[in-house]
């Protein structure tokens, strides 16, 4: 990752973090931060990740989450309602 890419990734992360903090100040949090269910977004089990994708629907930071993951070059887990944890050669599954 070059300096320009790293800067873009940092900016995307900052936008996501600010949005999450804004939600927290309103007493809200996104489903992926739930202490009981958060592991579904990073699970090796496809059914768990499908559930996570469904729970992403309607999330107030779904676009910022996906943008941050894109800028960081994430290749695994569920980000922005998309399952990036696909087998090699498969297309990412979107919710």
Image (spheres, rainbow, N blue to C red):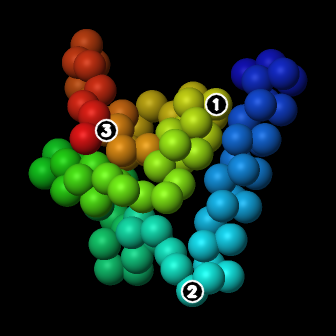
Pick whichever of labels 2 and 1 is earlier in the sequence: 2
- CB atoms at circles 3 and 2 under 8 Å apart? no
Pick whichever of labels 3 and 2 is earlier in the sequence: 2
Q: Position of residue 88 (x, y in %)?
A: 27, 19
Label 2 environment density (alpha carbons within 10 Å; few <14, some 14–19, many ≥20): few
3 with respect to 78 (left or right):
right
Residue 71: assigned label: 1
Residue 27: assigned label: 2
Considering only vertical position in the picture, is 28 above or below 41? below
The residue labelled by disc 3 is 83
Question: Picture quarter containing residue 5?
Answer: top right
Answer yes or no: is residue 45 visible.
no
Q: Position of residue 8 (x, y in %)?
A: 77, 31
Distance in Å between CA atoms under marks 3 and 1 = 16 Å
* Element type where label 3 sits in the image: strand
26 with respect to 81 (left or right):
right
Quadrant where the N terminus sits is top right
* Element type where label 1 sits in the image: helix
Q: Position of residue 95 (x, y in %)?
A: 25, 41
Q: Residue at x 73, y 61 (%)?
A: 18
Considering only vertical position in the picture, is 93 above or below 79? above
Distance in Å between CA atoms under marks 3 and 2 = 28 Å
């Amino acid at each position: 990752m070059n300096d320009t890419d790293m800067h873009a990734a940092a900016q995307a992360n900052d936008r996501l973090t600010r949005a999450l903090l804004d939600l927290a100040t309103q007493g809200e949090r996104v489903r992926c931060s739930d202490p009981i269910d958060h592991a579904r977004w990073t699970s090796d089990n496809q059914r768990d990740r499908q559930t996570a994708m469904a729970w992403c629907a309607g999330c107030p930071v779904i676009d910022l989450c996906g943008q941050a993951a894109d800028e960081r070059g994430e290749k695994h887990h569920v980000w922005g309602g998309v399952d990036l944890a696909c087998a090699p050669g498969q297309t990412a599954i979107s919710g």
